[in-house]
Image (tube, rainbow, N blue to C red):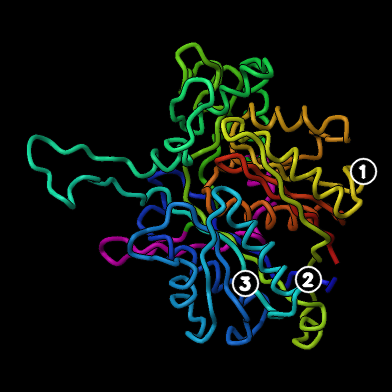
Amino acid sequence: MKEIVVASACRSPIGTFGGSLKDLKAPELAAQVVESCIERAGVDPALIGDVRFGNCLEPAKALNIARVTALVAGIPWAVPAVTINRVCTSAMEAIISGALQIETGFTDVVLAGGVESMSNVPYCLEKARWGQRLFDGVLMDALTTGLHAGSHFYPHPETGKPYIMGETAEFLNEKHGFTREEQDTIALRSHNNAERATKDGDFAEEIVPIEVKGRKGKVSVVDKDEHFRPGLTMKDLAGLRPAFKKDGSVTAGNSSGINDGAAAVLIMTKEKAEEFGIKPIARLLGYGMGCSEPHLMGESPVTSVQNLMERTGEGFDDWELVELNEAFASQFLAVEKGLQELGFDREKTNVNGSGIGLGHPVGCTGARIVVTLLHALKNRKMKRGMATLCGGGGVSTATTWELI
């Protein structure tokens, strides 16, 4: 196996839904991150062999958003690009598939990452094309419909009904019996960790300041995550109503956010890094994939981490930090429970917050957690870490990394 190294890794700040990044279309947001990723590495963009970017809710104006992003970022038209959709794991899949291209000798340099602008997902009139003959048309929200992750075609095995991802968190509660307090504890930790990391400057190096042009041409700069709630308390969380089930315990507070963001990593062979005079920041040690039942999609990282451990021989004792994206607090708890006997340690997991506190721009998060992991390891003078996340439909990926 060829040694695959990371030349640079960065991300945008994570914008809240309808927040500071809403006026940027997804390719415009992603292009700024891609430009910075290439600039940080000091590589001629013409030497990139492929661009692979994850995206879930692809804009109609930017089909193959990876290609559009690459062109907007100034990457020459001769460099190929492909968009990958493995739902929430898309950006990590972009990294893994890029690594496979390098391993097989197809190319030596890949720019991989992901983007999502959930603020810009449109409403649609599904029946309008062939004629709205009579009466009112109904607008479909492509965002919330997309967050059903195909369950309209593969519904719940017992109820026969489609379900939005928030309901899968309730399904996990029904299976495992997690309490509201247990879930809110995870949520509070995520928000507090994100707030502390922001105040301490832990994200300063990984975040690319994003320029946003206003209506009158005035440019503003967004350089901090804006989803976490400063000073959040358990009392605040306890006051929130259930979001997906009348007598449920999943709330907006213990769920991930609806967000905007982009992240990118430039990976290459060790030999190419030496040829380019690059001092790499990390090496990829291995990867794994797994699945769960679709309606219990949050449990899927249990299988991908097990697959990763089988493939690499590594375990939780080898990983000083772990990133487990928080789609929902109950999802985090389910994975924690499933991996407990293998050594899962909450205290070294999501030390700077995750999907609940930082937000979850779905097509971006798989790369975002890798970027954050690498920088957190560096800031804490550590060496090894693992990143994993679940995806709608019950898919999951996992990767393990070592700083150089």
Q: Which mark is residue 394?
A: none
Q: Amino acid at mark 3?
A: Leu
Residue 118 is situated, as x and y percent measured from the top left of the image, at 42, 48
Q: Earlier in the sequence, mark 3 or mark 1?
A: 3
Asked whether, in this view, residue 67 is left or right of residue 94, the answer is left
* Residue position marked by numbered label 2 in the rendering: 5
Q: Amino acid at mark 2?
A: Val
* Residue position marked by numbered label 1 in the rendering: 317
Q: Quadrant of residue 178?
A: top right
**CB of mark 2 within 8 Å of CB of mark 1?**
no
Residue 71 is situated, as x and y percent measured from the top left of the image, at 45, 78
Q: Residues within 10 Å of mark 1 (few under 14, many from 20)?
A: few
Question: Residue 257: in sight, yes or no?
Answer: yes
Q: Earlier in the sequence, mark 3 or mark 2?
A: 2
Q: Which mark is residue 111?
A: 3
**CB of mark 3 within 8 Å of CB of mark 1?**
no
Which residue is at 77% across, 27% downward?
Answer: 337
Give how far apart the Cα atoms at labels 3 and 2 are.
Answer: 12 Å
Q: Earlier in the sequence, mark 2 or mark 1?
A: 2
Task: Give the magenta-colored segment's residue range.
Answer: 195-221
Residue 375 is situated, as x and y percent measured from the top left of the image, at 73, 57
**Quick one: 17 or 215, which is closer to the camera?**
17
Q: Residues within 10 Å of mark 2 (few under 14, many from 20)?
A: many
